[in-house]
Amino acid sequence: MSEATVALAPWIAVQRTSLLAQRGHAWLLQGPSGLGQYTLGMELVRAWLCDAPTAQGACGNCGSCHAIDVRTHADLCVLMPEVQMMALGWPLSEKAQADIDDKKRKPSREIRVEAMRDAVEFAQRTSARGRGKAVLVYPAEQMNHITANALLKTLEEPPGDVRFVLASEAAHQLLPTIRSRCLGHTMVWPAEADMLQWLAGQGVEPAAAAAHLRAAGGRPDDTLALARSGRSPQAWAALPQGIARGDVAALGDWAPAQAIDALQKLCHDLLAASMGAAPRYFAPGDLPKPPPLGALTRWSRALAKEARTADHPFNAGLMLEALVAQARNILHSRH
């Protein structure tokens, strides 16, 4: 989803103003997925590099802002897994693009050490526009230990005119030494009424917004993505009973990773219901009767294991059938 097509959420604007008022060469934006870490990180680097910044952020009209919009800013280095770089329109290095075009390898799902070494070299260079330089790392937990250690050296002894923003959806996975060298900011979880108002401003019907917000676990960015995916709230509500019947069609045309995410949400809600707690992702009336706690615990572990290889299934169709068969057996288990 292009950030140009989404109005900035008011809770992101408030956090941006607060962080810009503070000094520091490195920020760590942390919190669960779907709360806007990437958006807030981009707002910070836009303001840092802007030719005419205000206390509320970048001007949006200068040469620097335009260069960021068209992904050509000489003083901005964006570090992401290549799959996300491509999805968000950021250019890869010439060598990386050539390797992928020539089918020598697939786009990386983690931040490659080669890209980090390029970023370290970038940090040593003189600013091209005279407003300093910025490095955005997202999601920061996608650095392996070699990549993280390459960044750590630069964080420990940063060049004078470079600032960093690390945006993470699993900050506990980062090296403690990296976390300790950044100013930490925990993402704000906005009020439901504010999220619904913002979603309405993006053209999402109120009834659908509330249903998608539940399906997304109350996370605004994930809710908007779900609303724009074309998936109906009715299909989501019908999923638990469809899975209980062993109906593969209940998962629609979802990729294995999406299917596993949906099944993990169903498992979560059944675990909550079995303990007397309120479900989070489905309405209580949409859930089947919970099986025994032991069966749900086994299912949760099995889904976590499947999630590790979901992006590389041997056969996606067979994997979905196996997932649904496994779920049906669990939901009808007596022990």
Image (cartoon, rainbow, N blue to C red):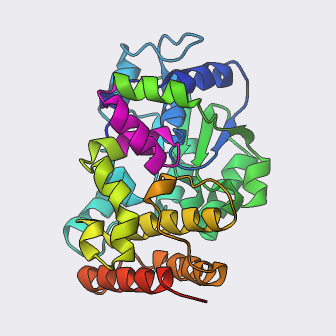
Could you say where residue 266 lies in the image, as x and y percent from the top left? 49, 65
Report the residue at 40% width, 22% height from top: 64
Taking 153 as reference, is 226 above or below it?
A: above
- In the displayed image of the protein, which residue is found farthest to the left? 102
Residue 305 spot, x, y in % from top left: 53, 81
Q: Nearer the viewer, residue 77 or 192?
A: 192
Q: At which x and y percent is residue 261? A: 45, 65
User: Where 252 sits versus 182, above or below?
Assistant: below
Camera-side residue: 3 or 328?
328
Secondary structure mostly taken by the magenta-highlighted segment of the chain: helix
The correct choice, above or below, for 158 with respect to 120 in the image is above
Tell how many labels.
0
Residue at image coords 57%, 51%: 120
Q: Nearer the viewer, residue 153 or 7?
A: 7
Q: Quick one: quadrant of the C terminus?
A: bottom right
Q: Is residue 90 visible?
A: no
Magenta highlight range: 202-225
Residue positioned 41% across, 34% down in the render: 74
Magenta span contains residue 220? yes
Q: Quadrant of residue 149?
A: bottom right
On screen, 86 above or below 69?
A: below
